Amino acid sequence: MEALSLPAALSLVAGGGAGLSPELRAALAASLPLVQRDYRFERVWFWGCIQGVRGAYYIAQGLGPDRAFPRALLFSGLNCLDWSLLTPATEEMLALAEEVKGRFQGDPSFEYTLPVKCPYFSLKPVIKEEARLIATIEEIDRAVGIVPRGAFVKTPLGSVHENRHFEGLSLVEAKKLSSYFHFTEPANLKNKTLLEKADLDPSTDFLNSLEHDIPQGSWSIQLEKGGSVVVLRSLLWLGLTFYHVPMTKQFGYVYFGTGEKNLDLPFML
């Protein structure tokens, strides 16, 4: 991914970063390079913002050499200058967070009382908002964190790296959902037939394509900025916006929302 300044990246997305004041943008531009240096990440990017009732969570992700390795999460709830490292998500966190409904409060120490039907009720009757935040970011990344086809390659040893030869999608390809992949562990690649696998390049086609997402119609794809930028928006996680400038290495995604899945989507299509 070609490195862009924060203002440049947000400007490629119509409405992207609308909730960031000039002061917060300046704070992010100053603090993220320091986070990268202090935690010895290879790269740090601004993931987005989850807006709570009484406050907001600004999220950044730190990446190491292997892009498929779990990404480190950091959040700032005040000024985008002071960052705290979050623990990795666990399956238990994800299961507990699924039981919580409604808006985030904006307080990491806030505790939600879980319903009795929760399978973990006897072990942990409450979940802190910090754990819910971690689980929600993980769920959003798994469901709608995407990259263009060919942007990353998988080595024979299984590690994933940026493709130095990737020069962007053509304008024709950039307008197809099949040209974008979920940047997470593939769920159904192994179920493809031998004939289907024959057309795949194992070094680049190791992820799931968006064209088979359920429900169908959960993505909108548009040309913006005079046709120079392709923008995809998730209708399942409202607030997730992905951009790609065709024929360049410029792409990325950002989330600005309440951290709530659009459960009504199947009835809206």
Image (spheres, rainbow, N blue to C red):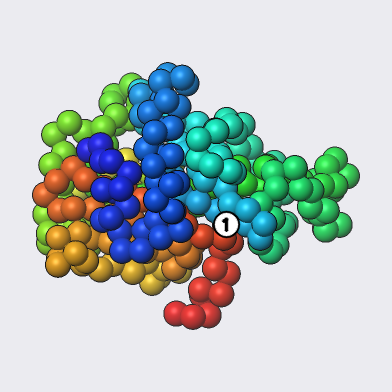
Kindly identify the residue that appears in the image at 32 percent across and 40 percent down.
206
Q: In the image, what residue type sits under mark 1?
A: Gln
Asked which quadrant contains residue 211, the reply is: bottom left
| Side (left or right) of 117 relative to 86 | right
Q: Can residue 42 be seen in this view?
A: yes
Kindly identify the residue that appears in the image at 45 percent across and 36 percent down.
61
Q: Whole-percent x and y of residue 87?
A: 61, 31
Q: Whole-percent x and y of residue 210?
A: 34, 58
In the image, 88 versus 152, the foreground residue is: 88
| Secondary structure category for the residue under label 1 | strand
In the image, 183 versus 167, the foreground residue is: 167
Q: Quadrant of the C terminus?
A: bottom left
Kindly identify the residue that appears in the image at 15 percent across and 66 percent down.
227
In the image, 5 versus 211, the foreground residue is: 5
Query: Dot 1 surroundings within 10 Å: few (below 14), some, or many (20 or more)?
Result: many
Q: In which quarter of the image is the N terminus?
A: top left
Kindly identify the residue that appears in the image at 59 percent across and 43 percent down.
77
Q: Can residue 144 be seen in this view?
A: no
| Side (left or right) of 238 relative to 117 | left
Q: Quick one: which residue is furthest to the bottom in this view?
A: 268
Q: Whole-percent x and y of residue 17?
A: 39, 56
Query: Label 1 belongs to which residue?
Result: 51
Q: Whole-percent x and y of residue 229?
A: 20, 59
Q: In this view, does 79 lie above or below 39?
A: below
Q: How many labels does the image show?
A: 1
